[in-house]
Image: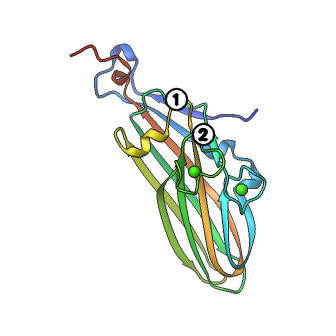
Amino acid sequence: MKHWFFLFLATALLAGCSARTVFVADVDVLSFISAEQLENDLVIPGSIQAFVPDADDNLTTPDGGQLLNRLPLLEKLSAFAVQVSVEVENTGSGTLDVSSEFRLAPVGDDKDIYDGVDDMKLAEASFHLAPGSKDTITLTAELEKGDPAMRLITNEGFRVGMKIKALGTSTAHYKITDFSLLLKQRPFDLIPDNGH
Ligand SMILES: [Ca+2]
Ligand SMILES: [Ca+2]
């Protein structure tokens, strides 16, 4: 059983809140990814794709990513934000072109959250890495109620994952240094609309 760490910030008690009150849950995804998945060495023989967190014991094959299904505030979520940071060091002698993307998928998309079927790309970035150099790639995305991607998040949860692609002939070391989610809920959205 993995540990789940939530920093739950209730800005006001429901009894005393206004229509502007928002409940916020700050979820540290790193706390339930195994340590051996957080950093790895890669041999890049021209090109490589790595999919993290890995769900099928093969870092280079796409899979269902990380299932997040026991989070607070999933009921009638009003906003969602993600920030992922990956530090990549070019430990070899060849230049590397590194790109990364963050995907969001519904719970049922358990085979491949990177194929564009049911899943969505929320953010992407790329950079050039000279031999011996190190850089941090940060992906961020924010969703509001009404955004099509919000449909992928249900009461049952959702899936997240990151694709890291490197082109070149070298070796590299990557380390995921931040993987945090922000879930927001407006308490008044939970009250059934009675016509007012
Ligand atoms: Ca895999
Ligand atoms: Ca898919």
In the foreground, 117 or 45? 117
Q: Earlier in the sequence, mark 1 or mark 2?
A: 2
The quarter of the image holding the N terminus is: top right
Q: Name which residue lies at 67% across and 64% down.
A: 50
Where is residue 100 drawn, in percent x and y? Answer: 55, 65
In the foreground, 96 or 157? 157
Where is residue 166 drawn, in percent x and y? Answer: 63, 74
Asked if residue 44 lies left or right of residue 105, the reply is right
The alpha-carbon separation of the residues under discs 1 and 2 comes to 13 Å
- Rendered view: 23 above or below 133: above
Tag nearer the camera, 1 or 2: 2
Please name the residue that numbered disc 2 is placed on. Answer: 108
In the foreground, 4 or 51? 51
Please tell me whether mark 1 sits on a helix, a strand or a loop. Answer: loop
* Colouring of the image: rainbow
Where is residue 116 drawn, in percent x and y? Answer: 52, 55
Asked if residue 124 lies left or right of residue 53, the reply is left
Ligand 1: which quarter? Answer: bottom right
Q: Amino acid at mark 1?
A: Asn
Please tell me whether mark 2 sits on a helix, a strand or a loop. Answer: loop
Q: Place residue 47 in its image quadrant.
A: bottom right
In the foreground, 143 or 133? 143
Q: Name which residue lies at 29% across and 17% down.
A: 193
Please name the residue that numbered disc 1 is placed on. Answer: 155
Q: Amino acid at mark 2?
A: Gly
Q: Name which residue lies at 53% across and 52% down.
A: 117
- Rendered view: 158 above or below 12: below
Q: Name which residue lies at 55% across and 34% down.
A: 7
